[in-house]
């Protein structure tokens, strides 16, 4: 199978890009705290009350922030974290060093679906700001792979950017994002400004966001139930489904 987007050529192979994201994401990812709060609410509501160890798989873990947020609500979870960047995997190991038993795998999503590296199924598969780097056909393959690696009633949640249905909406959403960054910087007295990030995001060929509607359709055709967009603010969305 030929894959169009090669992780090896993306900016995530670059150490500086990795560090820049880790240090600054909270300043420019729109409502990042709210996104995590919704993820934790879904986790508590659908998964955490059955008194069993919950098996979590995080795709594109970066420095492990998402799993770290989940560990704050469930310190007993059994976590597997995957990322294509060795730099990011090292940062995740460092951030989460006080939680023994986590498993870290350095591999790309493309390799993951081709050479099945996972020996078990999961109750919760989560990803944040990583899957939009894939082409639409790759997303389809990944969603099917996730469905096949979920336990019954397990959930997949993707916190990610999406493409607006029309160009005029896309332009407004990017402006809305910039307005949020400026508002946040004013509120927190930031000296460095990240207001150019929405333009950089739009011009970066590593980003391949698809329309939300298409991705919900892909999830439904992979077999997921309870497919929906659980939150949306401009291009930032949380969507997913249950097995
Ligand atoms: C924007 S960062 C997000 C990190 C983390 N999920 C967070 O929200 O803090 C995107 C991450 O996805 C990883 N990534 C991007 N494309 C990937 C691919 N094809 N396979 C594996 N990892 C990938 C990058 O290495 C990077 O760590």
Image (cartoon, rainbow, N blue to C red):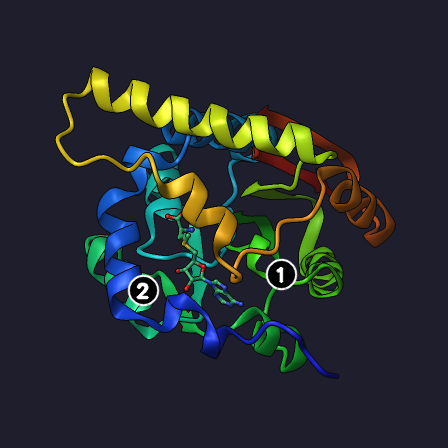
The residue drawn where x is 32% and y is 44% is 68
Residue 232 x, y percent position in the rendering: 59, 26
Whether the residues at callouts 2 and 1 have beta carbons within 8 Å, the answer is no
Q: Secondary structure at mark 2?
A: helix
Q: Is residue 119 left or right of residue 128?
A: right
Residue 193 x, y percent position in the rendering: 23, 35
Residue 40 x, y percent position in the rendering: 46, 30
> What residue did someone put label 1 on?
121
Q: Nearer the viewer, mark 2 or mark 1?
A: 2
N-terminal of the pair, mark 2 or mark 1, is: 2
Where is 7 relative to 55, above or below?
below
Question: Considering depth in this image, is 199 or 78 the residue closer to the camera?
Answer: 199
Q: Name the mark on residue 88.
A: 2
Counting every numbered tag in the picture gives: 2
Q: Secondary structure at mark 1?
A: loop
Q: Is residue 98 left or right of residue 65?
A: left
Q: Residue furthest right?
A: 221
Q: Residues within 10 Å of mark 2 (few under 14, many from 20)?
A: many
């Amino acid at each position: 199978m030929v894959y169009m987007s090669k992780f090896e050529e993306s900016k995530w192979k670059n150490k500086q890009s990795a560090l820049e994201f880790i240090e600054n994401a909270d300043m420019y990812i729109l409502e990042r705290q709210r996104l995590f709060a919704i993820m934790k609410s879904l986790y508590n509501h659908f998964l955490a009350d059955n008194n069993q160890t919950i098996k979590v798989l995080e795709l594109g873990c970066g420095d492990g922030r998402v799993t770290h947020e989940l560990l704050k609500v469930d310190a007993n979870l059994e976590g597997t974290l995957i990322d294509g960047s060795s730099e990011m995997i090292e940062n995740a190991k460092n951030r989460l060093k006080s939680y023994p038993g986590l498993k870290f795998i350095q591999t790309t999503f493309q390799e993951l679906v081709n050479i099945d590296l996972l020996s078990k199924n999961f109750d919760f598969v989560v990803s944040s700001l990583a899957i939009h780097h894939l082409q639409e056909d790759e997303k389809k393959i990944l969603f099917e792979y996730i469905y096949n690696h979920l336990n019954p009633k397990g959930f997949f949640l993707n916190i990610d950017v999406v493409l607006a249905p029309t160009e005029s909406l896309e332009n407004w959403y990017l402006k809305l994002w910039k307005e949020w960054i400026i508002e946040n910087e004013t509120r927190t007295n930031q000296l460095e400004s990240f207001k150019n990030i929405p333009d950089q995001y739009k011009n970066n060929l590593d980003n391949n966001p698809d329309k939300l509607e298409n991705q919900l359709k892909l999830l439904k055709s992979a077999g997921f139930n309870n497919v929906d967009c659980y939150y949306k603010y401009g291009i930032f969305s949380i969507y997913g489904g249950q097995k």
